Amino acid sequence: MIRKPERTLSFAHVEAWVFDLDNTLYPADCNLFAQIDRRMGEFIATNLGVPLEEARTLRETYYYEHGTTLAGLVRLHSVSPDAFLDYVHDIDLGAVLPSLELAAALEALPGRKLIFTNGSRKHAEAVVERLGVSGQFDDICDIHALDYIYPKPMREAYERFVRAHGVAPRRAAMFDDLPHNLEPAHRLGMTTVLVDGLTEHPEHQAIAGWTELPAHIHHRTDALAPFLAAIGTTLAAETGPSPARPLQAQFCLT
């Protein structure tokens, strides 16, 4: 893991904490995407009437050409987004365990916490419930809010997100496991954090060969909860005691 050079960019300016969902809020070694990928292939094969191997090829092609497999299916085949999302997210979440450490770290951060995901709000809600952190988030921006065809990393997705949620990019920090999703965030002025986790995804594999952080990534961590806890501790020391967050934070799903 790259530890130096460490970028000393402060988080004192951050008012909005923006988190990807999959492989970011939970560890990548939960390997939920193995299940999701398999079900995407099955859905494509069944609905387009093609062999499973061809369906897998289409899944990858649409992902790279359209940002998500779903966006390609909607644009090119008029597939029902809800049918696709309901099928591919019907998975076993047993590998996602409650994290008291993550809940405490999120609680200690000042400002709003938002989830920004290419998945569905139903999937996001299920995952944060499993993690035991659902009460920590003020809102969720999911693929429905992005009209299915404007996913991350399209700039349109980020512009829609900041408009809908009143986020000032230069006062926001974004956490994601995919480097390309952090590029538009950086261009808008957000502080960026790569949450590193090794999977079979080509971008995750490429990260292993890095010798330094790309310019669009300010920080990198392979353990989200301790990283957030350290930020919270530093901010508390810099700013002193802050008013307690209400016990029941609003959890609005966009």
Image (cartoon, rainbow, N blue to C red):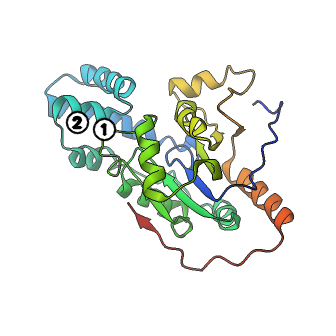
| Residues marked 2 and 1 touching at CB (< 8 Å) | yes
Q: Residue at x 60, y 21 (%)?
A: 206
Q: Quadrant of the C terminus?
A: bottom left
- Give the Cα distance between marks 2 and 1: 7 Å
Nearest the viewer among 174 and 189 is 189
- Residue at point 81%, 65% (across, down): 236
Q: Position of residue 38 (x, y in %)?
A: 34, 34
Q: As rendered, which of 200 and 82 lies closer to the eye?
A: 82
Left or right, 229 with reference to 128: right
Q: Quadrant of the N terminus?
A: top right
Badge 2 element: helix
Q: Position of residue 83 (x, y in %)?
A: 21, 47
Q: Is residue 193 left or right of residue 9?
A: left
Q: Dividing the picture into quarters, in which one does residue 187 lie?
A: top right
In the image: residue 178, left or right of residue 105: left
Q: Which of the numbered marks, if any, corresponds to residue 149?
A: 1
Q: Is residue 209 above or below residue 141?
A: above
Question: How many numbered tags mark residues here?
Answer: 2
Q: Measured along the vertical axis of the image, is residue 112 above or below residue 200? A: below
Does 147 sit left or right of 103 as displayed?
left
Q: Where is residue 249? Give x, y as percent.
A: 54, 74
Front residue of 254/198: it is 254
Name the amino acid, label 1: Ile
Q: Is residue 3 above or below residue 87?
A: above
Q: Residue at x 64, y 64 (%)?
A: 111
| Amino acid type at image mark 2 | Val
Q: Which mark is residue 62?
A: none
Circle 2 is placed at which residue position? Answer: 74
Q: Is residue 155 above or below residue 114?
A: above
Q: Residues within 10 Å of mark 2 (few under 14, many from 20)?
A: some
